[in-house]
Amino acid sequence: MRNEEYLTIQDMKQKGMNISQIAQMLGRDRKTIRRWLNGKPPEKQHHLPNLQKLDPYKDYIYQRMNEGCINAVMLLKEIRHKGYQGEATLLREYMRPLRSQIRAKAGNRREALPGEEARVDWGEITVNLHGIQTKLYLFVMTLEYSQIIYAEFMENQKLETLLNCQLHAMEYFGGVTRHVIYENLRSVSSGLDSQGRIVWNRRLIQFAGHYHFMMGFYGSRFNSSRGERGIRFVKRNFRLNEYTYTQLSEMNDKVWDWMDDMANKSVHEASAERLVDRLAREELQQINRDHFEILDQHFRKVSNDCLISYQANHYSVPGRFAGQVVHILEQDGCIRIFHGTQEIAVHQKALGKQQIFRKEEHSRTGRESGSNEAK
């Protein structure tokens, strides 16, 4: 028995675990555990002073492992942020006997083949944004074979938002899997037909056909034994509340840095391979580079005071378009207004309602030269 295992057993006992639970977690006989608990510690204690460096952080490590974070690289960065100055090997030795129980809880599951499957889900979060508690949505797409993830925070769960995020994810992965499984997503389906088949959203069908993947659906109204693993992983491991934000783009910059520096540089639980090495074997299909129109177009007639109405707010356009029909695209937090193929105005999307956003040049007497400027 190692010094580290002996100290781990003592910690488990202090946390209230009985002999049977400890034996099951460590894969040891109950008599052996009882003997170690009742007997003296091992004679060789050369590493004991070093192990004591980890003591103030053991409760935190134990909690995080039970939450599902069993990656030593991530936990090392977290406890060093809290003041830990010991070696990474001490953390790994402490975590090693605890992993078997954590993995047993997760259960056995069939491993996906390279390039076979990706999973998509939304999660809800509340964050302090602009000094206001704001409800946002977390998009996560996970490659099932390599476990590489893509995450993005958004303001809504509309279908066009989902498709835009999925396209970002496919570009980040460098290709497309043969199947994409959607979990608990109301926007992709209206339910089941009379024969129990999924009624897919028409535009999602077109999107899947354009990018050559098959669709699957797991959700609360359908049979699912897995669900939301990607969402849980991001929420548990990306320390969202350790940062302050003034705008949505800052949140996404942070989570993308975390993906590149930590999440996707970690080790695959079952194979102990690096995720990036498994990504190289994913055999993803190439992305169709022909343009697919993701965003919905909303048509409006410009009023005599050079305004259009959109989602209970008003936005100005150049005066010469008064009385004409224009269309609106909502993209990256902006309202983009077009007349035919010409972009005639751009506004930041309003956060509230019943607001008017007017640019000085957007009037019947304003400067026509400013009508095409995006400000």
Image (spheres, rainbow, N blue to C red):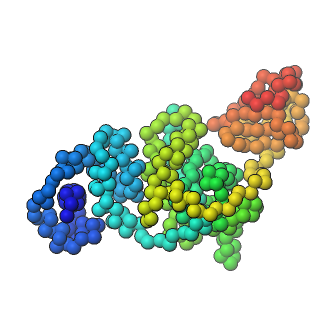
Tell me which residue sits at (51%, 70%) in the image.
111
Q: Position of residue 314 (x, y in %)?
A: 75, 34
Quarter of the view holding residue 102: bottom left
Q: Position of residue 264 (x, y in %)?
A: 51, 52
Q: Position of residue 42 (x, y in %)?
A: 13, 60
Q: How many marks?
A: 0
Q: Position of residue 210 (x, y in %)?
A: 75, 60
Q: Is residue 156 visible?
A: yes
Tell me which residue sits at (31%, 57%) in the image.
95
Which residue is at the front of the view, 342 or 288? 288
The answer to whether 249 is drawn above or below residue 286 in the figure is above
Tell me which residue sits at (58%, 48%) in the image.
152
The answer to whether 151 is drawn above or below residue 39 in the figure is above
Quarter of the view holding residue 180: bottom right
The answer to whether 40 is drawn above or below residue 82 in the figure is below
Which residue is at the front of the view, 327 or 301? 327
Question: Could you tell whether 354 is left or right of 43 in the image?
Answer: right
Q: Is residue 16 visible?
A: no
Tell me which residue sits at (73%, 29%) in the image.
375
Question: Could you tell whether 81 is left or right of 358 in the image?
Answer: left
Question: Could you tell whether 110 is left or right of 106 in the image?
Answer: right
Q: Quadrant of the N terminus?
A: bottom left
Which residue is at the front of the view, 214 or 182? 214
